[in-house]
Amino acid sequence: MKILHLSDIHFKVKYSDSSTQYLQMLQSMQHPQEKLTHLINLLKNKGIEYDFVVITGDLCDDGTVEDYKQLKILLDSLLSVPYFVALGNHDIKENFYKGFLNEEDNRPYCRVFNLENFSIVSFDNSQYGLSNGFIDVDRLNWLKETYRKLDNEPVLLIMHHHLIKRQADIPALETPKAFRQILCDNSTMGILTGHTHHQFADYYQGIPYFTADAIAFAGQDMSDGKVRFDENYGANIYTIKDHKIINNSVYSLYTGKIIKEVHF
């Protein structure tokens, strides 16, 4: 079985707000729809197949209901296999539920997707506008109860924020001991994250751990509060056999194009 891992699309139908340098950068970048379409077609033309797709958050960038509707239309048109999503700090939950799922809700998006040999657990550790993410008691209890119900069935955990401090200059998610205990005491076969916009592979508490490149853009810390934004993007494809991730193929598309340098 193979899984395509996408992340950080930061989709909007139109990037019309230019009130900050970051928003001006979004206006200047190649539209994520074009990048995503190119990537999916590139994999197709190379004969690279996959059984499922996961997208680890920041689906839209402060998206409206219409933005989420149009993103879903795009994904449905590009992907011929089932896909599963997690939410990030740029996702507005109420608009996601209404535009993407046609539901009225604003609660954390925590879901379980039961596949043939394991389950994908989408864990929402995000809050709109809170860049570093967080885990509250209710979500922690949900995760604990979810693992209990799965009764030691293998789990692939997908979430937005990264967990390993040394992988990026931006802060990693602060995790309570109980969170780490839940993952380690059960059959967690892997953890997939986004947020950093740069691919990364390691182990978290002994569990295989991967972050995918963003679709939208990549950021490079230039020090003194300055970040250089590049057009680079990509994805990972994992091979799963006997409840284990046995291979990670990284597809990083380097364009050599700088979008903008932004002072924060």
Image (tube, helix red, strand yellow):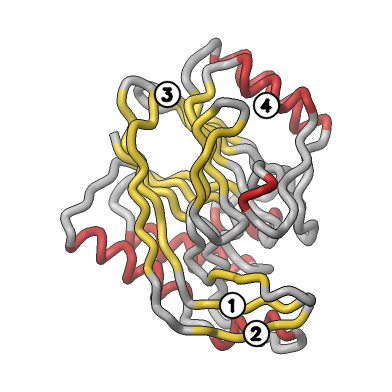
User: In the displayed structure, does residue 18 sit left or right of residue 234?
Assistant: right
Q: Is residue 200 above or below residue 264?
A: above
Tell me the residue that label 1 is attached to: 229
Residue 82 appears in which quarter of the rendering? top left
Residue in the image at 67% along x and 20% along y: 182
Please name the amino acid that badge 1 sits on: Phe
Q: Position of residue 154 (x, y in %)?
A: 47, 20
Q: CA distance from mark 1 to mark 4?
A: 35 Å
Which mark is drawn over residue 261? Answer: 2
Q: CA distance from mark 3 to mark 2?
A: 43 Å
Q: Secondary structure at mark 2?
A: strand
Circle 4 residue: 143
Instruction: Report the amino acid beneath label 2.
Output: Glu
Q: Residues within 10 Å of mark 1 (few under 14, many from 20)?
A: many
**Do labels 2 and 4 touch, CB within 8 Å?**
no
Q: Neighbour class for label 3 at 10 Å: few (<14), some, many (≥20)?
A: some
Residue 179 drawn at (x, y percent): 72, 27
